Amino acid sequence: MPDLRLLRSAAFRMALFGLALLLSAGLVVFALLYDVTDSFLEGQAGQAAAAELEGLEAHHRRGGLPKLRQVLEDRMVTGHPIAGVYLLSGPDGARVAGNLPAWPDAVPDAEGRLFFQADAAKTGTEGPPPGTQPVLAFTRTLLDGHRLLVGAWLGERRQFRNRIVETLFWGFIVIAGMSAAGGLAIRRNVTRRLETINRTTRQIIDGQLHARIPHSPGGDELDRLAANLNDMLDKIERLMNGLRHLSDDIAHDLRTPLNRLRGQLEMVAIEMREDDPVREAVQDAIQEADRLLEMFGALLSIAKAEAGYQRMPLTDVALSPVVWRVVELYEPVAEEKSMALSVRIDRPFVVRGQEQLLAQALANLVDNAVKHTPEGGGILVAVAPSQDEPGTGELIVADSGPGIPPEDRKRVLGRFIRLDRSRSTPGNGLGLALVDAVVRLHGARLVMEDNGPGLRVRLCFPILAIHDVGSVTVD
């Protein structure tokens, strides 16, 4: 199986594109050299045959047929004829002289060239390789009606051409192999440096804001990119630290006077008579102070979750006890609204996390379900390994309430976001924002689905271990 990550790599695609471009250019050069070499060698043979034909025709004009026959016999005697293949035939087609046994059965092309095969051994010509060899020839009809053919052997020339082509081919293979090796080396180097950048950015996303990308001063483009990213990260870290300190200061500075105000209001309420008309307004003010304190607590919890691993010690957490604890907390509220709050533990599993934040995130989900599920409805809290993703476990909260439209499911994860139909219910719009922050802290995923009717929220965690104790369902 090919590594799909390698195939999707930009560096691999760039190296592959460069290699394909080089191979295409090499093939074009290879084809041009082949064509030029073939044309040159055949042109050289054709020029030799045409020049010899002109010379023999001149001998015929000066001395007639006897002179031409004498010259042809001299060519055969030397054993090294100029052109290689000769044939003089009479007007009736009978062979008169030459080393070709008979007139070839071939048709001249548009340039008057004749291509055919001849047996070098039968012609008695030295030089060409043994066996049947290709011949390029020209013909001429003489003034007395005789026909003269002069041809040149192409075998040696084509062998020379093939040797050049073979050399070019292996040179092309060597260049392609070296280019592929170079491309892979470049891809590995670029991928390694990009992975360093990706790994560092992943650490920063996980909360390690002090992480920086290693680079060489005055290096190449990737080094300059790393330097610019580090400068940007330095500025972001300063801004976030300043914002965090400001948030902490505001939270502490406001919580203290709010607690003092609440205490004073409680003292006033205690000292008032039961029938005092102002007492109800004081009780309302106390509830408003509680709501503000709850909102500050939620904001601080979100900030704590978003602070990352370096500020939140993580341990092995079994989710089943967390589920039972939260469900027991909300059972009285569910009974008061005539709701069926049930628990299903298919196979309990252990995750790496922070137990208090996990309990708070689950409590927020159950609290939302209880608030938005009508009387007589049902809520299910389930723990089970994922059927779709091996090595992943799911913490599920499903209700039979109005649900959340698909287009709003991402938006409700923001802070202080409340849908129009939720305005009449208590809350501050921070519950799902906290759940999302906790999920991201634990490297998990939050998925919202239709429950038909209602909303089904799945928190998908990486599993450390599974306790095979069978399925447990409690209504």
Image (cartoon, rainbow, N blue to C red):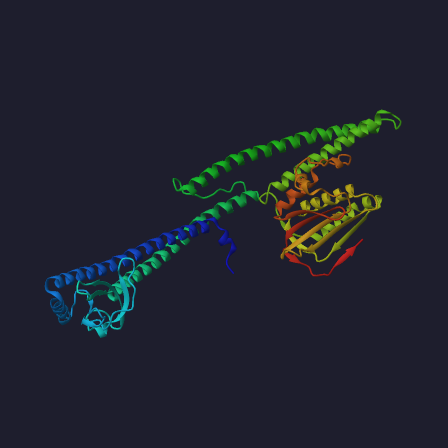
Which image quadrant is residue 253 in?
top right
- At x 50%, y 59%, the residue is 2
- The correct choice, above or below, for 249 with respect to 30 in the image is above
Left or right of residue 443, residue 347 in this image: right
**Is residue 318 at all visible to an observer of this figure?**
no
Q: Count how many numbered circles sit on residues in the image.
A: 0
Q: Decide if residue 54 is on the left or right side of residue 223.
A: left
Identify which residue, 30 or 308, lies in the foreground. Answer: 30
Between 356 and 143, the one nearer to me in the picture: 143
Query: Please, is residue 113 above or below residue 441 in the view?
Result: below
Spot the residue most to the bottom. Answer: 122
Judge by depth and name the residue closer to the eye, 412 or 312: 412
Residue 348 in sight here: yes
Residue 318 picture location, percent across and down: 68, 53
Q: How far across and how far down the image is residue 59, in percent?
A: 12, 63
Residue lying farthest right?
Answer: 275
Percent position of residue 475, x then y: 80, 53
Q: Nearer the viewer, residue 77 or 255?
A: 77
Decide if residue 98 is on the left or right side of residue 18.
Answer: left
Q: Position of residue 256 (x, y in %)?
A: 69, 30
